[in-house]
Amino acid sequence: MSSVAVVFARYVLGIILTGMGSDGARGMRAIQDAGGITVGQDEATCAVYGMPRTCADNGILQRVVPLDEVASVILEAIHYHARQ
């Protein structure tokens, strides 16, 4: 995540999903510091809320969403519009 943040800066979308530990926080912070978008899975839909919690508790996440909304967030971020 950190190297992607350096190269692509504000064009990066970082998503942290269920998992133990805090190892994703450093990379997510790099994305945030570079001006990218940071999203975390909400506690209710996580099997283990460790990594998203660490990011949320440290003010790294711009959005927290249920797992079933992650795809929509990605599409919004790239300004995707479905053909009707």
Image: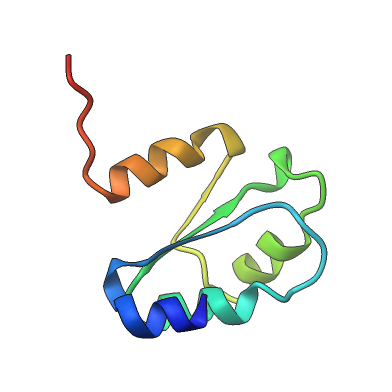
- Position in image of residue 62 (x %, y %): 44, 62
Quadrant that contains the C terminus: top left
Above or below, 8 relative to 70: below
Q: Position of residue 1 (x, y in %)?
A: 52, 75
Task: Give the left or right position of residue 14, taking residue 7 as reference.
Answer: right
Quadrant of the image occupied by residue 12 = bottom left
Say which residue appears at 28% left-offset and 67% top-offset. 11
- Residue at the (66%, 60%) spot, across then down: 52
Identify which residue, 5 or 18, lies in the foreground. 5
Give the residue at x 50% y 35%. 69
Horizontal placement of 33 versus 23: left or right?
Answer: left
In this rendering, would 44 be left or right of 71? right
Q: Position of residue 77 (x, y in %)?
A: 30, 50
Name the residue: 72% across, 76% down: 23
Q: Is residue 44 above or below residue 60?
A: above
Q: Is residue 40 left or right of residue 3?
A: right
| Vertical arrangement, residue 12 with respect to residue 47, above or below | below
